[in-house]
Structure formats: C-alpha cells, structure tokens
Amino acid sequence: MRFTKMHGAGNDYVYVNAFSEKIEGDVAELARKISDRHTGVGGDGLILICPSERADARMRMYNADGSESEMCGNGVRCVAKYVYDHGIARKTELKIETGRGVLTLQVFPENGVVTQVRVNMGEPILEAAKIPTTLAGTPPLMVPLEVAGRTIQVSAISMGNPHCITFVDEVNDDWVLGVGPKVETHAAFPRRVNAEFVKVISPTEIQMRVWERGSGETQACGTGACAAAVAAALNGLTGRKVLCHLPGGDLTLEWAESDEVYMTGPAVEVFSGDWTG
Ligand SMILES: N[C@H](CCC[C@H](N)C(=O)O)C(=O)O
C-alpha cells in the first residue's frame, strides 16, 4: 500500500490516497501499526484521502491509538495540499468533507507546490452537551475541574472534536505530561478530550502545547489552536485574531465576525513509500 508522510507544524500523519489504494481489513489496527515510531512508519495517526460525493475529497482521520476523530485541522490542510499537488483537483479553492461537514480551503502554491493553506474551520460549538462535556456553561469558561489532586480552571470548546483549554503561567511538562492525560480521560468528558495548555503572551499572541486524545503530546493541533483562540477571546484574554506558537511551528487564527474560525498554516510533504506490514 502506497503512503505519503506529511506534517503541518510538526503534527505528522501517514496519508493514504484512497482514490487509488485499496484499504483492506481493520483500519483502527492499521492506524495503530503504521503510527508506531519504532515498528511502523511513525506518526500521530493515519489519514485517509477518500473520494466524496459532496466535495473534492473526504478526510478520515485516526489517532495513533486507532480511535477515529471527527476533525483534524493540521490534517485537513495537508489533505488540501495533497489534493492540489497530486492533481486530484487542481484548484486553489478546495472543498474537503470531514466529520464536521464540508470545509472550504484556500491553497497557496509556490512554483506549483502548496506551502500554506487557509481553512474555514466553521463555527465553534459552544453548547456543553454537544462538546460533549458535563461541565456547566455555554461554553464552560474558567470552570473548576478536579484533576491530579488539584483544582484547575478550564474552558471547553468543540471545533467538531472536543477540546479542554487551561490557561497557565508557564506551559511546561507538569501541565502537558502530568495533567494532560488526566484531563483526556476525566469523567467530565464522556468522549474523552484533547487537552490544551495555553500561555497568553499578548492580546494577539499565545503559546500552546497539547496533549491529544488518542495520540499523546503532538507538536501542534490545528483544531486545538482554534479552540484556544476562541476560549482566549471569550475569556477576554486576547482579541479575535491571534498568532499561536506551538512546538512545531506557528498557526494564525482569526475568529471572524461571521462566527467562523479561519486558520492559516503550513503543509509539508516529507516522503512516500510502500507499506508492507
Ligand atoms: N491534531 C489535530 C487534531 C486531532 C484531534 C484528535 N486527537 C482527536 O481525537 O480529536 C488537529 O490538528 O486538529
């Protein structure tokens, strides 16, 4: 099976073109095996680029533990790059079907190869039951959560997939590796949750690290950065346009007056190969 390794701000996935490749058997099992950094290709998960009846392509995204997620912001930018660069649809405005509907993306090619992608990520989902979380509020903002023997203040937002944002003074391992896994599996989040730890640098700049549901710490999370930007604006910590610094690079987020969140960031193809495992 032919695969392509791509990343967006260091958030790396193994991509398979399901227009041409036949994906057989248990996809969750394939995602676990192929994502393994010692015995597989290595990545934060597996993304299938599939035909769609409603869009130029459809993205299906699996975490490294085999669980399927509704959305992936860094992934959808890479899918758009793949669709353009590999000639599935040679248009600078693309539609990609995801678990949260059809998204519109703008690709920016340089010498025929896409380097940056801007995505209309849609409106944030603020209703607690739809995030889903048992925390109170629309959305829950700075609400207490008992975790790892302490009480922290968290905000919850969905961008199609669930996020729990904690604003901290310093983004460090204690938060991300210590608290992150406990937030992921906290009973307040019935479908588990992606946990973001965010330092506000200025009204236009934030720094973030993420502990992802199903994949652990990753170098960046597009949906998480959008959720963090919305939570920061709603908490009055920033304006509606921010630059987000992540371990693997920067993303630009803008929560437009239309209520839609626009994300701009890099998409990079690294190598291709044949999976024989
Ligand atoms: N890294 C992805 C999000 C993956 C989310 C996944 N871990 C989940 O279970 O929702 C992003 O760029 O948006």
Image: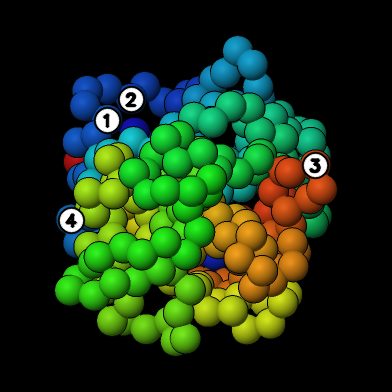
Task: Classify mark 3: helix, strand or loop.
Answer: loop
Task: Classify mark 1: helix, strand or loop.
Answer: helix
Q: How many marks?
A: 4
The reply to whether the residue tagged 3 has its Cβ within 8 angstroms of ligand 1 is no
Rendered image: mark on residue 258: 3
Would residue 85 be found to the left or right of residue 256 on screen? left
Rendered image: mark on residue 27: 1
Farthest residue toward the top?
Answer: 53
The local crowd at label 4, few if under 14, some if 14 to 19, many if 20 or more residues have their Cα within 10 Å, is few
The quarter of the picture where residue 181 lies is bottom left
Would residue 102 be found to the left or right of residue 173 on screen? right
The three-letter code of the residue at mark 2 reads Ile
The three-letter code of the residue at mark 3 reads Ser
- Which callout, 4 or 2, points at the residue further toward the start of the chain? 2
Task: Classify mark 4: helix, strand or loop.
Answer: loop
Residue situated in front as seen by the camera: 106 or 100? 100
CB-based contact (under 8 Å), mark 2 and mark 1: yes
Residue 127 at x, y percent in the picture? 51, 39
Would residue 20 be found to the left or right of residue 78 on screen? left
**204 vs 220: above or below:** below
Residue topped by disc 4? 39
Rendered image: mark on residue 23: 2
Q: Can residue 173 be seen at all in this image of the molecule?
A: yes
The three-letter code of the residue at mark 4 reads Thr
Q: Can residue 116 be seen at all in this image of the molecule?
A: no
- Which residue is located at x 36 percent, y 22 percent? 22
Labels 3, 4: front one: 3
Residue 158 at x, y percent in the picture? 50, 45
The local crowd at label 2, few if under 14, some if 14 to 19, many if 20 or more residues have their Cα within 10 Å, is few
- Which residue is located at x 19 percent, y 36 percent? 29
